[in-house]
């Protein structure tokens, strides 16, 4: 796997994720770290307060490290995960742990031969819809696809699908914005 300075690893979160992935692979702990970071993404999505504390410059690195340490202990994270989160916090990168987690999850999926698709929709997708979307994407990309969903009500309808560096936007919000711009130009 190429872990050079590509789109995924060009930022700090990507570099942290790459280092963590290499350590996890060497320690044969990729699955455990992947499960931890998936749980962390869920926690960040479910708790805007947690995400805000991590991103806020009002809270020092020591506070963020303490929060992440307690969270890691309570969630029984693998020591590699806990240590990486602690290092990120100490180095002023706690606000990027969501991106770190996403980058790591994409690397782990790619290592398994699976591509990841991030899908944003105005309302939660049913299991059947997610399966149909995964099948459609598999046909388009020729690989198994792991679909990660996110609800964004501001989209009003439709989907935004991001696979690697490609993005497909069929959201109602984008279509309305396009119509608005076209009307302004007329």
Image (spheres, rainbow, N blue to C red):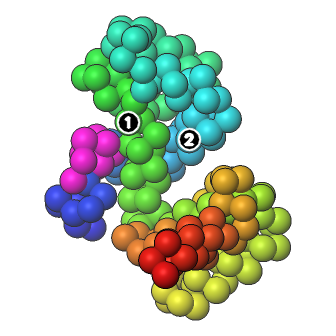
Rendered image quadrant of residue 99 = top left
By secondary structure, the bulk of the magenta-drawn segment is best described as: helix
Is residue 7 magenta-colored?
A: no
| In the rendered image, the vertical position of residue 146 relative to residue 51, given as above or below | below
Please give the name of the residue rendered at 54% of the width and 76% of the height, measured from the top-left corner.
183
Q: Is residue 122 above or below residue 87?
A: below
Residue that lies at the very extreme toward the front in this rendered image: 186
**Image mark count:** 2
Which residue shows up at 77% across the image and 58% down it? Answer: 123
* Residue 92: x %, y % from top left: 28, 23
The x and y percentages for residue 91 are 25, 23
Relative to 91, residue 59 above or below: above
Foreground: 108 or 123?
A: 123
Does residue 146 appear anywhere in the picture?
A: no
Q: Secondary structure at mark 1?
A: helix
Quadrant position of the N terminus in the picture = bottom left
Magenta span of residues: 10-18
Q: Secondary structure at mark 2?
A: helix
Q: Residues within 10 Å of mark 1 (few under 14, many from 20)?
A: many
Q: Seen in the image, is 136 located left or right of residue 163?
A: right
- Residue 16 in the image: x percent, y percent? 28, 40
Lower position in the chain sequence, tag 1 or tag 2: 2
Q: Which residue is mark 2?
A: 41
Q: Quadrant of residue 8?
A: bottom left
Residue farthest left in this picture: 5
Q: Residue at x 66, y 83 (%)?
A: 135
User: Answer yes or no: do the residues labelled 1 and 2 have beta carbons within 8 Å?
Assistant: no
Q: Which mark is residue 96?
A: 1
- In the image, 58 versus 128, the foreground residue is 58
């Amino acid at each position: 796997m190429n872990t050079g300075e590509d789109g995924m690893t060009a930022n700090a979160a990507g570099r942290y994720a790459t280092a963590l992935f290499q350590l996890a692979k060497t320690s044969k702990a990729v699955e455990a770290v992947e499960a931890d970071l998936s749980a962390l993404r869920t926690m960040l999505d479910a708790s805007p307060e947690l995400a805000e504390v991590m991103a806020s410059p009002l809270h020092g690195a020591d506070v963020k490290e303490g929060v992440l340490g307690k969270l890691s202990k309570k969630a029984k994270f693998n020591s590699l995960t806990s240590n990486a989160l602690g290092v990120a916090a100490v180095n002023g990168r706690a606000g990027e742990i969501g991106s770190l987690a996403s980058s790591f999850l994409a690397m782990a999926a790619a290592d398994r031969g699976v591509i990841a698709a991030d899908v944003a929709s105005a309302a939660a997708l049913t299991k059947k819809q997610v399966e149909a979307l995964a099948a459609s994407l598999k046909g388009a990309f020729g690989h198994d696809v792991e679909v990660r969903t996110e609800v964004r009500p501001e989209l009003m309808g439709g989907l935004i699908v991001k696979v690697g560096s490609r993005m497909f936007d069929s959201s109602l919000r984008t279509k309305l914005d396009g119509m608005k711009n076209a009307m302004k130009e007329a």
